[in-house]
Amino acid sequence: MVKWLVRIGGGLILVLGLLFWWLMLSSSNAAKTAPGVFDLADWRSKASAPPDMLPTSIRILEVGRDTAPPFAAQAGRFGAPVAMSYNAVEITYPNRTIVIGGAVDRTTAEGMALSKSEWRFSDPAYDALTTAMLSAEQVLMTHEHLDHVMAIARHPDPAALAQNLVLNAPQIDALPLFANGALDPALTTLQPGLTGAVDSIAPGVVIVPAAGHTAGSQMVFITLQNGEEILLIGDIVWNMGAIESLKTRPVLTQYMVFRPNYEDRDAIKQQVRALYDLIQDNSEMHVLPAHDRDWLMTAAETDGIEFLAAN
Ligand SMILES: [Zn+2]
Ligand SMILES: [Zn+2]
């Protein structure tokens, strides 16, 4: 009897151990190499413009914040929670702006809340963002996940917003998923404003398609007047620690959080390696994951990068 109990107990521990390994640690190493995945020289040539035509700054417009368990953000990471920011980015020229990101509305942010003590949402910041989207020359997003699309899908003035939207085809296809009820008619007849190729949309601003996290994921490469280079990478990783340690999010997050929009993990593994290599060779470039709050706040110590916190 005791022998059987020991065997069953041992079997259970083995099964749980395997499950832990699969969910938390497996299939999470970046690719060994990723030649040709990203082409910085191409971005730079497409971003180039006379200095007085380039943007002067970016402003990270935070609408909410939270913390996430470290093991969910980065496979094999344990310890302190990861501070998460929910935001959009405004690219500022002397006479116009471009907004990247739809961020998240209050209803959705409340539904996603993880930490009772750290969660915040700022209604004034959200209102300021939806207003900024109307005065912007163009409004884009990094990708079509709910925490990046709500201020577009649920914008208070969709007819006016629709004039400014520059989305790619998978992003347009995803919009109805996030409407509160039926999507406003102004948002059901959008035509893609992006071709899916690496392309400049304004002086100093280049869109770099990077399908993987979602089908419509893209990065934004920005060159400022003061020479600073910024790369918005959306959710390729949630925190820079993942790139620094060449790790992706764990399988657990893929199945628990992104259901049913599973990531293309192989594409992410390539992109994490490509970003790692890019940073090795260009350490002065500001690579900004959408959610890494601590990293964004540190980046904002640079001239030309501003972080407006939602407190
Ligand atoms: Zn995402
Ligand atoms: Zn996100």
Image: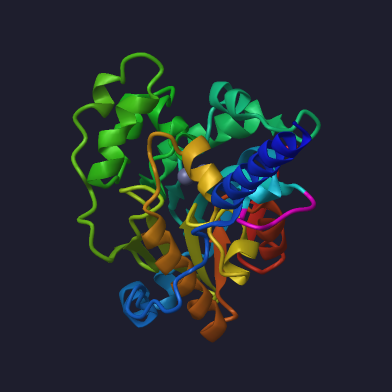
- The residue nearer to you, when weighing 275 against 10, is 10
In this view of the protein, can residue 219 be seen by the observer?
A: no
Residue positioned 79% across, 53% down in the render: 79
Which of the 4 image quarters holds residue 133? top left
The residue closer to the viewer here, 37 or 150, is 37
Left/right of residue 160 with respect to residue 81 in the rendered view: left
Q: Nearer the viewer, residue 267 or 100?
A: 267
Which secondary structure is most common in the magenta stretch? loop
Estimate the x, y position of residue 57 in percent, counting from the top left. 55, 62
Q: Is residue 77 magenta?
A: yes
**Quadrant of res 39:** bottom left
From the image, which quarter does the C terminus lie in?
A: top right
With respect to residue 247, does 132 lie above or below?
above
* Residue at 31 percent of width and 15 percent of height: 182
Q: Is residue 292 visible?
A: yes
Whether residue 167 appears in magenta in the rendering, the answer is: no
Q: Which residues are magenta?
A: 74-80
Q: Is residue 286 above or below residue 255?
A: below
**Residue 123 occupies which quadrant of the picture?**
top right
Left or right of 177, for residue 237: right
Residue 31, x across and y down, in percent: 44, 71
At a point 72% along the width and 65% down the height, the residue shown is 301
Q: Where does residue 293 sit, x and y in percent of width and height?
A: 68, 51
Along the viewing direction, whichever of 25 and 204 lies nearer the viewer: 25
Specify the quadrant that holds the N terminus: top right
Residue 187 is left or right of residue 222, and the answer is left
Compared across the picture, whether 224 is left or right of 6 comes to left
